[in-house]
Image (cartoon, rainbow, N blue to C red):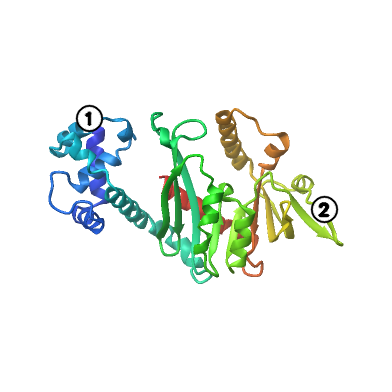
Amino acid sequence: MAKKMKAWIKTIRQLFSYEELTRLERKVGFIQRQRSLTAEAFLTLCAWGDGSLACQSLQRLCADLALWHDCSLSNEGLNQRFTPRAVAFLKEVFFTLLMHQRPALSSITETYRACFTRLWILDSTSFLLPTDYGEDQGSVSSGAKIQFEYELLSGTCLQLCVQQANDSDARFAYHTQHTILPNDLCIRDLGFFSLATLAEIDARGAYYITRLRSDIKVYIKQDGEWHEWDWESIGNRLGEGEAVEVEHVYIGHQRLYVPRLIFRRLTAEEWEKRLAYVRKKEKKKGKALSRQTLEQKKYHILLTNLPQESFDAQQVYELYSLRWQVELLFKG
């Protein structure tokens, strides 16, 4: 334990200088005058990698502060430090870490800087809380969810908020759409899928790339008649990694018009990884997917209103992959 904590403190000091942490704490008014509890000590305590902060007593936390940071603080004194200003300080630390990581994405984003006003990516992550956190009860056990909205071109964060674990991602996305500007690109994962949101993005003169949910039907209009898109027969003709594009499709019972659908069969390696993820979710929920739904997961289906003359199918996939890069930054 002692060795791990020393290594963790060393990591904190490598990431943040004393001057940088002092600037962040003063920016939000977290520590307004010199006290025994320093910003470094508080950050080390809150960000300790074993995630035990919420499970430890104030007495134990105070003992850790005394042992590792020579900080003498009463139980009530530490309790009074957990304030909205402390939350604001930890947010500033998170934003600063993102900016440190941004150079890893700069070479990719520079390619698209002239194409879009902004490049928005929404992501969320959920985690369990101690079972006695009753006010944050999820559908199965106590849990919370962090919603994160990131603008990739400038490296700024628009949203970082905490919700209950069972709150809808799609509803969150719908209530943030008022911030979308013309020529923005919004990249969304399955959890944020919403026909109403796609329609609103398009109406605002912006663009979207999103995966298609397996329960949403796709239609094609031919000679004035509606026909359900037969993805199975097309998929059976595709080899591993091959893709086909379908123009002018309509999705859902509202028949929402979508200019482009890009349909790609996963490689054997990709399917193996996705299947492992699917089985893990099935086990967690205690419910197996239907044969048709499982079969559809062998394919990657993207919807977009990006103009085909400016972005071919490969470029659409490259843009969508930026969401995964940001997810690694966020959840890492």
Q: Amino acid at mark 1?
A: Arg
- Determine whether, in the image, residue 184 is placed left or right of residue 296: left
Disc nearest the viewer among 2 and 1: 1
Residue behind mark 1: 60
Percent x, y for residue 70? 12, 38
For the image shown, how many numbered marks are present on the structure?
2
Residue type marked 2:
His
Q: State the image coordinates of residue 19 (x, y, percent, origin top left).
A: 19, 56
Q: Are marks 2 and 1 in contact (CB under 8 Å)?
A: no
- Judging depth in this view, the residue of 250 and 308 nearest the camera is 250
Specify few, some or many for label 1: CA neighbours under 10 Å numbering under 14, 14-19, or 20 or more: few
Q: Residue at x 39, y 33 (%)?
A: 133
Q: Secondary structure at mark 1?
A: helix
Q: In the picture provided, is 248 more to the left or to the right than 319?
A: right
Residue receiving disc 2: 227
Residue 159: image quadrant is bottom left
Distance from the alpha carbon under mark 2 to that under mark 1: 65 Å
Q: Residue at x 60, y 37 (%)?
A: 272
In terms of depth relative to the viewer, which is nearer, 96 or 266?
A: 96
